[in-house]
Image (cartoon, grey):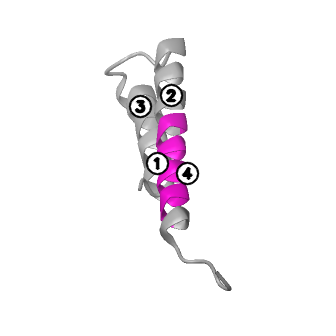
Amino acid sequence: MVQALLLIDVVYGVLWYRLLLDHAPLDEAAGRQLASLSLRSKAKAIEEKTELLALTPRRGS
């Protein structure tokens, strides 16, 4: 599961490197890729948590 703090580091890392070092453009395509990465990692985390909850015995059952 991707940790939220690591994901934040990834997003800000891309932004800072592109702004400060100017090695690649910080354009709409980069923004879309970052948004896609963020949403996919969040969806994966939700999926993994749902799977874990499904395996957890419930009280009183």
Q: Earlier in the sequence, mark 4 or mark 1?
A: 1
Whether label 4 touches label 3, CB < 8 Å: no
Sequence-earlier tag: 1 or 2: 1
Q: How many marks?
A: 4
On the image, numbered disc 1 is attached to which residue?
7
Q: Which amino acid does the dot numbered 1 rest on?
A: Leu
Q: Is residue 26 above or below residue 52?
A: above
| Res. 46 mark | 4
Q: Nearer the viewer, mark 4 or mark 3?
A: 4
Q: Could you tell me the amino acid type at mark 3?
A: Leu
Q: Nearer the viewer, mark 3 or mark 2?
A: 2
Could you tell whether 24 is left or right of 60 in the image? left
* Residue 53 on image: x %, y %: 55, 65
Task: Mark 2: give few (<14), some (14-19) or many (20+) Cα within 10 Å.
Answer: few
Q: Indicate which disc residue 20 carries.
A: 3
Name the residue tied to disc 2: 36
Let me know if residue 6 is in the magenta part. Answer: no
Specify the segment rendered in magenta: 39-52
Give the residue type at disc 2. Ser
* Mark 1 / mark 3, whichever is N-terminal: 1
What type is the residue that disc 4 sits on? Ile
Q: Residue at x 37, y 22 (%)?
A: 22
Looking at the image, tell me whether mark 3 or mark 2 is earlier in sequence order: 3
SS class, disc 4: helix
Instruction: Look at the numbered disc 2 and give the secondary structure of its residue.
Output: helix
Q: Residue furthest left?
A: 23
Q: Is residue 23 above or below residue 45?
A: above
